[in-house]
Image (spheres, rainbow, N blue to C red):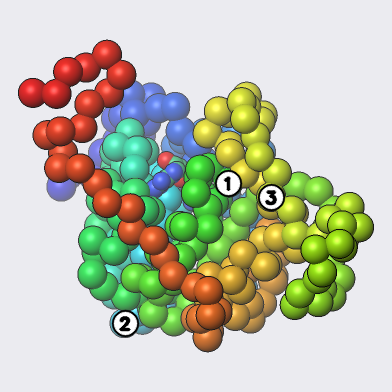
Amino acid sequence: MPELSAAEIRDKVLALGPWFHNLDLNGVKTAPDHFLGDYPAVKWCRFAQAIPADLTGKSVLDIGCNAGFYSLEMKRRGAARVLGIDYDEGYLRQARFASQVTGLDIEFAQLSVYDVGALAERFDLVLFLGVLYHLRHPLLALDLIREHVVGDLFVCQSMQRGDPGEEPLDPDYPFSETAIFERPSYPRLSFIEHRYSGDDTNWWVPNRACMKAMLRSAGFVIDDNPEEEVYVCRPGPLPSAYGAIHPARPPAHTITRVGEVAA
Ligand SMILES: C[S@@+](CC[C@H](N)C(=O)[O-])C[C@H]1O[C@@H](n2cnc3c(N)ncnc32)[C@H](O)[C@@H]1O
């Protein structure tokens, strides 16, 4: 592939926008006016040291990869194979262009987190960054990731809101106990019916205790918490009530949307 000029990169970046990731493509910034600053570089530098610096020979799955910022970083650390998945084809087009410009060989595929079982493969490192709160079924996603794709390391990041505290909880309480639910640091997942920050894809926002409890409940052991929203985990023992459900789906040709008639 011939090297693109700065003008050609700029034109293509404009055509592929808007961008959520502010990548640096040979000096061309893809989202210089991001509302979170130089994102996600500002986030990454706060937990980069918690992920192995040398990924030589390792496989990486980046779930909800967006334009591929983290996939590119994992490839730069020498990973043998990096697969980025996202359900949004527009973001995947950006990611493929970034991979082309940087010359980093990364696979990208359109796939929802709920379908990771279709990969039929475990990865040495799985990234699940900034996706959980965009899901209507966050715990199902964690269960499926644990059941199907995590081989060794799992790095999870979520927006968190509410009380950041934690306190020990008993494994059980009598039905008459109601006061614990009033405690600010009780594990809490806040439901957003409409929008948060103008975004109608934000559905559930955990507080810190809830994030940690959900990870444990999905069968992860939290090894490290290098940044307030980031958890470095490994697969651990599965809780007794564990088990990802796999909802049955009708064959594709019988699925209709409101207003459509089945063929
Ligand atoms: C806030 S961005 C985070 C991007 C990147 N992981 C990061 O941390 O910068 C959320 C990404 O998750 C993707 N996403 C949302 N729901 C998804 C789903 N069900 N399956 C796969 N990707 C999803 C979106 O398309 C978007 O690219």
**Three-letter amino acid code at disc 3?**
Leu
Residue 25 at least partly seen: no
Element type at marker 3?
strand
Q: Residue furthest left?
A: 263
Q: Which residue is mark 1?
A: 133
Q: Where does the image place residue 140, in percent across and percent down from the top left?
A: 47, 57
**Three-letter amino acid code at disc 1?**
Tyr
- Mark 3 crowdedness (10 Å alpha carbons): few <14, some 14-19, many ≥20: many
Residue 163: mark in rendering: none
Q: Which residue is mark 2?
A: 57
- Mark 2 crowdedness (10 Å alpha carbons): few <14, some 14-19, many ≥20: few
**Three-letter amino acid code at disc 2?**
Gly
Q: Which residue is mark 3?
A: 189
- The mark nearer the N terminus, 3 or 1, is 1
Q: Is residue 88 left or right of residue 47?
A: left
Cβ atoms under marks 3 and 1 closer than 8 Å: no
71 or 180: nearer the viewer: 180
Q: Residue furthest bottom?
A: 237
Please tell me whether mark 2 or mark 3 is closer to you in this view. Answer: 3
Q: Residue at x 75, y 77 (%)?
A: 171
- The mark nearer the N terminus, 2 or 3, is 2
On whether ligand 1 comes within 8 Å of the CB at mark 1, the answer is no
Q: Residue furthest top?
A: 259
Q: Residue at x 67, y 29 (%)?
A: 197
Element type at marker 1?
helix
Rendered position, 135 above or below 115: above
199 or 69: nearer the viewer: 199
Please identify the quadrant where the C terminus is shown: top left
- Real-space Cα distance between discs 2 and 3? 38 Å
- Real-space Cα distance between discs 3 and 1? 10 Å
